[in-house]
Amino acid sequence: MNFKILITSVGGEFGPKLILSIKNDKKISSKIIGTDVKSNAIGKNFCNFFYQVPNPSNKNYIKKISSICKKHKIDLVLPTSDEEAYTLSKNRKFIENNKTKLACTDFNTIKIFNNKFLTYEKLKQLNIPRPEYISIGNPSQLNFEITKMLKKYKKIVLKPVNSRGGRNVFIISSKIKGFKIFNDRREIETSLKSFKNKFKKNLTKSYPLILMNKLKEPVYDLDILAWKGKPLRIIPRKRFNSAVPNDGHIIVNDKNLINLEKKIISKFKLSWLYDCDIMYDQNNIPQILEINPRPSGSAVVSICAGVPLIRDLLYLSKGLKPNKRKIPFNKRIIPYKNLYQIN
């Protein structure tokens, strides 16, 4: 079958590998139309066509995406950033038609997924495990709650409710002095004193924040492919380096994680492909860290392991059911640098 797929935000680290995996899939014939807000996005060199687009908050963003869809007669639009999934789902009527489908859930659900506090509130309502959490609206509340929670847990996490990709995350610990900034990660580990003296003042424009207990490493990324609230593929991937999600994974057969994801899929009536991050607590109960309203930036790990997730999406866009396939548990996938000749 022939497909034309529009993939947004092709400037990600694994963008080239994702695009090549689709092109090299011998079961389908596809053309890749890529977009990004940056003109030099690395993925542009691997697409059949590339377009620079406005920021998704710009009023012209939807017009641009819609015109690209019409020009190339796109079968499937796959947003790969939170902001684009939000904007596209909100304006679905301008994108979808008899031919073009948008691979993300409804706007009301994405509004929840895009906000960690709203996500945790909904999970609490649904009786789905999540960390202990508090929404922080101002500096004085932060002073009070951070001291209180640190006494209870000894190590806590502070981050913006709308952050993604581990950005602006502080691990505040009673066990260290000073602070540690890691070159290979975005989070900062700090003592309470150092946090108040050095970092707190820089968060003025970041409120509201969310404060939560620190869970046990490792972090698990789960690729979840679903259709109308039914699971099609659930692939748990344990990170080799919890703070650096692109350092490699091993696919694990963890029934606790798989069963938890089945509940997520059912309760939110999900369709298409999503990413969910999970960690275990001190009582060895898996807790939902976040549910992303789009595929993981490292979903190509599962594809490299032998699960054709993008082919599955393209089949679903045409009303076809993906073929049954065993999940390749215990496979290890690691990144490496490579070279590619472009014309």
Image (cartoon, grey):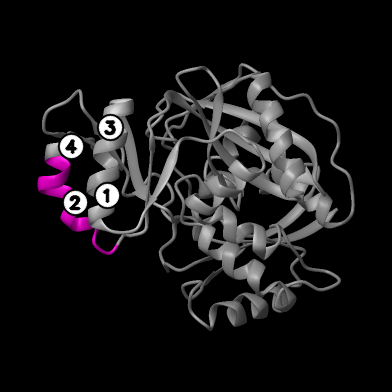
Crowd class of label 4 (few under 14; some 14 to 19; many from 20; radius 10 Å):
many
Residue under label 1, please give it: 142
**Position of 222 compared to 244: left or right?**
right
- The magenta stretch is 194-205
Crowd class of label 2 (few under 14; some 14 to 19; many from 20; radius 10 Å):
some
In space, the residues marked 1 and 3 are separated at their CA atoms by: 12 Å
In space, the residues marked 2 and 1 are separated at their CA atoms by: 9 Å
Going from N to C along the chain, the mark reached first, 2 or 4, is 4
Amino acid marked by disc 4: Leu
Q: Which mark is residue 200?
A: 2
Closer to the camera: disc 3 or disc 2? 3
Q: In percent of the image, x 63 and y 69: which residue is there?
A: 88
Residue under label 3, please give it: 150
Residue under label 4, please give it: 192
Q: Is residue 342 above or below residue 237?
A: below
Going from N to C along the chain, the mark reached first, 3 or 2, is 3
Crowd class of label 1 (few under 14; some 14 to 19; many from 20; radius 10 Å):
some
Q: Secondary structure at mark 4?
A: helix
Q: Secondary structure at mark 1?
A: helix
Q: Secondary structure at mark 3?
A: helix
Q: Position of residue 49 (x, y in %)?
A: 60, 67
Amino acid marked by disc 2: Lys
Closer to the camera: disc 1 or disc 4? 1
